[in-house]
Image (cartoon, rainbow, N blue to C red):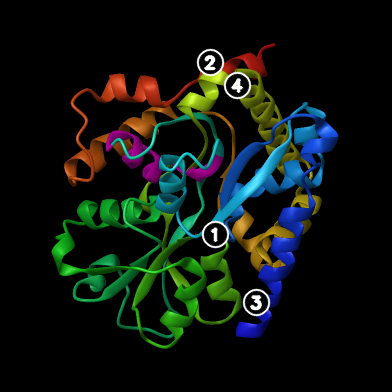
Amino acid sequence: MRAKILLIWMIAALYAVAAPVSVAASGKTPVRMAVLQTDIHQLAFWVAREKGLFERHGVQVELAGIFRAGPEIMSAFGAESLDMAYVGEAPSTTAVANRAADVVAVAQVNTEGSALVIEKMDDRIKTITDLIGRTVAVPGHSTVQDFLLRKALATHNIDISNVNIMVMKPPEMIGALRTGQIDAFVAWEPHPSKSATMGVGKNLMTSAEMWAAHPCCVLVSSAEFLKNNREAVKSVLKAHVEATKFILENREEAVKIGMMSTGMDEETVRRAMETVTFTYDLNIAGEKEYVQFLSEIGYIRVPDIDRFVDRFIQEDLLKEVLNP
């Protein structure tokens, strides 16, 4: 199994480095971008690469990294090694609020598309209250999935101290659930769907049940990069919008690209895509809810939520793209 996973990621790595047009040929410095590992939410990026949409809109994109969790991407922004990225809204909000990175959101990528998963044959856990005293894995602190778990626990009046939350990268979660190292996990798709198709796990709650229509991933740009390269960011945004429309209008081909980008089987990808809403429309109300809750649990301190959100979410470019 480990050999199979390694082979899949070797193929993915070759695909990642082969796709960009050479800088020498284009005469332009490429935009350094990042995505999350095996994340079906960020399918628009892979569609844009596969269909040549970045080049069509006059911009070269270099895949500068495939990261295991959103906070890692934000650390890369803090080190000034990225220009743009597809990343969770919660870690980007946290990083900006804590001045660990300076990015702005220029488009939504998706809503919903995560789940709280338990072992398939575990009849001890029937509701979220049964997680008291148990171990639940999340991809990282300040991730969307960490936020969703904490929100769901708070909604059901469960003190967070009564649940053992541990950090584990999504590719490791299914094995840990199967061997009893953890009792549950919260992850982005397609990992919940993969746990089901492998016969290991089942959903206790989908993220739609935890927070209906919640914003999940966003397309972000370094604030400095946007300031100095507005047209390049706008071109990436055009490609993102077109790729999102392609996913919605060409489901069969999008499934194939999803299989290629995640290394997962067709049944898993189809199942995963049913829980994800691909969209580029920014959700300001959802971002305000993120900021409010992240402030309440002490992850961030934002004295003026409206002012913070107005700076973090930059709608002007998207409006220009949609209404030229």
Numbered disc in front, either 3 or 2: 3
Q: CA distance from mark 3 to mark 2?
A: 42 Å
Q: CA distance from mark 2 to mark 4?
A: 15 Å
Q: Report which residue position mark 2 lands on.
A: 316
Q: Residue at x 38, y 21 (%)?
A: 311
Label 1 SS: loop
222 is higher (above) or lower (below) than 72:
above
Q: Report which residue position mark 1 lands on.
A: 189
Label 3 SS: helix
Query: Of 280 and 233, which appears nearest the observer?
Result: 233
Q: CA distance from mark 1 to mark 3?
A: 20 Å
Q: Are marks 2 and 4 in contact (CB under 8 Å)?
A: no
Label 4 SS: loop
Magenta stretch: give its range: 85-98
Q: CA distance from mark 1 to mark 2?
A: 30 Å
Q: Earlier in the sequence, mark 3 or mark 2?
A: 3
Q: Are marks 3 and 2 in contact (CB under 8 Å)?
A: no
Say the numbered circle drawn on residue 42. Answer: none
Q: Earlier in the sequence, mark 1 or mark 3?
A: 3
Q: Amino acid at mark 3?
A: Leu
Q: Report which residue position mark 3 lands on.
A: 6
Observer able to see residue 265? no
Label 2 SS: helix
Image check: 113 left or right of 245? left
Residue 275 at x, y = what percent?
Answer: 56, 54
Q: Is residue 95 located in the magenta-colored stretch of the structure?
A: yes
Residue 320 lies in what quarter of the image? top right
Q: Report which residue position mark 4 lands on.
A: 229
Q: Earlier in the sequence, mark 1 or mark 2?
A: 1
Q: CA distance from mark 3 to mark 4?
A: 37 Å
